[in-house]
Amino acid sequence: MTLTFEEARALHGECCVLDLHADTAKLMDKLGYDLAARHERPMPRAANLIGHVDLPRMRDGGLAGQFFGFWTTPYPERGCTQSVADQLDAIDAAIAKHPTELSWTRTGVEVRAAKAAGKIAALGGIEGGQALEGRLEAIEAFARRGVRYLGLLHFSANAIGRPAKGRGAEPAEGLTGFGREVVRECERTGVIVDLAHINRRGYFDALELATRPPMVSHTGVLGVHPHWRNIDDDQLRAVADKGGCVGVIFARRYLGSASIDAVVDHLLHIIDVAGDDQPALGSDFDGFVVPPEGLEDIAALPNLTVALSRRGVAPRVLEKILGGNVLRVLDAVPAWGELAA
């Protein structure tokens, strides 16, 4: 049965809807973007690159929690650690200013509690291991501040390994010795390993080491659209074998279409290949991506739920896609505070 928009929105109210990646914190830090203010929906097509997320529209979309991705400019690498700290400070400032609206969370328990209290859960992830500046001890420092995932690579090589594409890309080289130490240290400190952007060899190197569930925070899949940014079926199965999840990106160029049904195609392909415990949402909103028609901003998320239901996805599976699979990973990987207790 196809849900109406209102029925989809009601379903969002009943479950924990989570998005694995939005770059809004950089806008807050550098441009003074007010997360609590309602912004006009960005213009369609090419102009719709940023301005997708704010608290009023999160509520409109029925979002329970947002992972804010902290990205940094890798050259020069010096200053990347501070850049992540500045973005964390921007989120902290928004929470301090709006404590009844927004709550910093690290665990599935805390996300559920925030929702029960009528708050949006804020979570943090780092996009690109250059944020460590080659220092293993930075991982624990970030974990203590509540960072929940570390994307090992972004668009350039760093001390950990090589990107899927970008400066220093090299398909034949996997994780470095330091990169292997980073994976182990992430697991020690309760930081989930994120395999978005890393090259294929490094991807499998990291999974060989992993003893806790990993994730791919935002990606497309090659089984639907051939693009260097997307991952293949073996990569999907490998993450599923480790109990992880994969967030589908809302970017037309990686989806291969301007239609919201392209997002559905990618999500359903993940289910077909690796099962319904794996797919999740990884919008990349505010990350200079053009989302498909019908997903112009975070308020439009119920349209995706409608589109999934139109393709026959049952409510039980909808709840997994919308956030249940992410909660399972959060529950399976103890955060720093839990590990230190």
Image: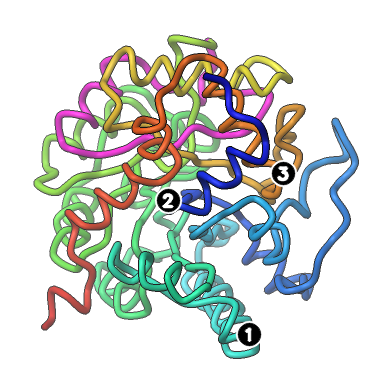
Camera-side residue of 323 and 23: 323
Front residue (pair 136, 15): 15
**Cα distance between the residues tagged 2 and 3:** 29 Å
Which residue is drawn at the image coordinates 60% and 57% (left, top)? Answer: 73
**Tag nearer the camera, 1 or 3:** 1
Q: Is residue 221 above or below residue 212?
A: above
- Percent across and percent down for residue 163 are 43, 36
Q: Amino acid at mark 3?
A: Phe
Residue 289, image x and y in percent? 70, 38
Q: Nearer the viewer, residue 261 or 209?
A: 261
> Which range is magenta?
226-254
Circles 2 and 3, Cβ within 8 Å, touching? The answer is no
| Comes first in the chain, label 2 or label 3 | 2
Residue under pointer 2: 15
Q: Does the magenta-highlighted stretch encompass residue 29? A: no
> Which residue position is annotated with label 3?
288
Q: Look at mark 1 in the image and give the residue it sits on.
A: 98
Residue 328, percent from left and from top: 25, 49
Q: As shown in the figure, which amino acid type bears the numbered disc 2?
A: Cys
Q: Mark 1–mark 3 contact, CB under 8 Å?
A: no
Q: Secondary structure at mark 1?
A: loop
Drawn side of residue 293 relative to residue 186, left or right: right
Q: Residue at x 53, y 24 (%)?
A: 308
Going 12% across and 35% down the picture, which residue do you hit?
208
Rounded to the nearest angstrom, the CA distance separating label 1 from label 3 is: 27 Å
In what quadrant of the picture does the C terminus appear?
bottom left
Q: CA distance from mark 2 to mark 1?
A: 23 Å
